[in-house]
Amino acid sequence: MTSIPTQGASRIAFFGLGKMGLPMASRLVAAGWTVTGFDPFDGAREAFEKAGGRTDGAAARAAEGASVAITMLPDGKAVRTLLAGPDGIAAKLAPGAIVIDMSSSAPVGTRDLAADLAKDGVVLIDAPVSGGVKRAIDGSLAIMVGGDADAVAAAKPLLEAMGTSIFSTGPIGSGHAMKALNNYVSAAGLTAACEALQVGQSFGLDPALMTDILNVSTGRNNSTEVKLKPFVIPKSYTSGFSMALMAKDLRTADDLARHQGVAAPLSRAVASLWTDALADLGPTADHTAIDAYVAKPGKDA
Ligand code: NAD
């Protein structure tokens, strides 16, 4: 049975202290665990130190002897490079260590990585999250967990410090599959809502009134409830979740559909639309800026 350290033991390494990783790792510190964080960006490590975390400027040293490593990186390729690349840190972890990949990674790649890490006695589980920066800060994330049941049970106390809705989804990779499919549904809802607002406004409808009506009608979705008024209607586009990461998730969902032999034509169309939007708006765009893209003349979105 795999076990994890109790609060106070300095055996947890956390990789990726970005918009999500910083508040998630900070919640572990607040819950009593001693966490060593690593991020190549100096400012991220400084912010984690301010939250009470320890840091190390070298990934390998942060990993040394840890019995749990948590990754919150841009994608599964970054996770593989960190763990199993030429300078992979998996070999530095304690024997029988658990790696919890909380990034939104591609599920088939996660399955392959788990098999590779198992050769070194390291157990990988996937535990991606939903809820965004706000829910990362208040510890109310939804977390979907795939992998070996003993390792998932052992990781649960850590996950409970970061989320309130924790689901076991099945074998390794199933959490990442669920996450990509969730984001496909979420992006489709956001795209539809933005298009509806643009068309309605051009016909003289008030976008705030439209949002109120959608939210008590059958067109309601997460984006109409929590994204239109704060980020889309004022055109601030500051949700904290980048368009690049959402486009990556949509390609992951589409790749999964192809891998499984499911036609999924809307998933394909949404992935393609968001890939084009990212190319047009650039890597710094927030995902809510899809609103600006669908409004551009000549787009057949
Ligand atoms: P982010 O770009 O803010 O953070 C990623 C961090 O990883 C950066 O600070 C980067 O410097 C760091 N990093 C890159 N390579 C590293 C390495 N080898 N070792 C350690 N750190 C490394 O991204 P984010 O918004 O925090 O998203 C992280 C993950 O969470 C992504 O997979 C994303 O799809 C997912 N996610 C994001 C949100 C959101 O609202 N932002 C919500 C749910 C899931």
Image (cartoon, rainbow, N blue to C red):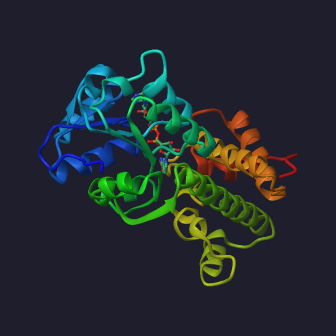
- 201 to the left or right of 6: right
Q: Looking at the image, which residue is at 72% across and 33% down?
A: 279
Q: Is residue 157 left or right of residue 193?
A: left
Task: Give the image location of residue 227, x and y in percent.
Answer: 55, 62
Q: Would you place residue 144 above or below residue 2 in this image?
A: below
Residue drawn at x 45%, y 35% as measured from the top left? 118
Spot the residue most to the bottom.
Answer: 216
Q: Residue 244's image quarter?
A: top right
Q: Which residue lies most toward the top here?
A: 86
State the image coordinates of residue 137 (x, y, percent, origin top left).
32, 54
Report whether residue 135 is seen: yes
- Residue 72: quadrant of the picture: top left
Q: Nearer the viewer, residue 33 or 248?
A: 33
- x and y, in percent, of residue 240 in the image: 47, 47
Q: Nearer the viewer, residue 269 or 151?
A: 151
Q: Is residue 107 above or below residue 115?
A: below
Residue at the left extreme? 8
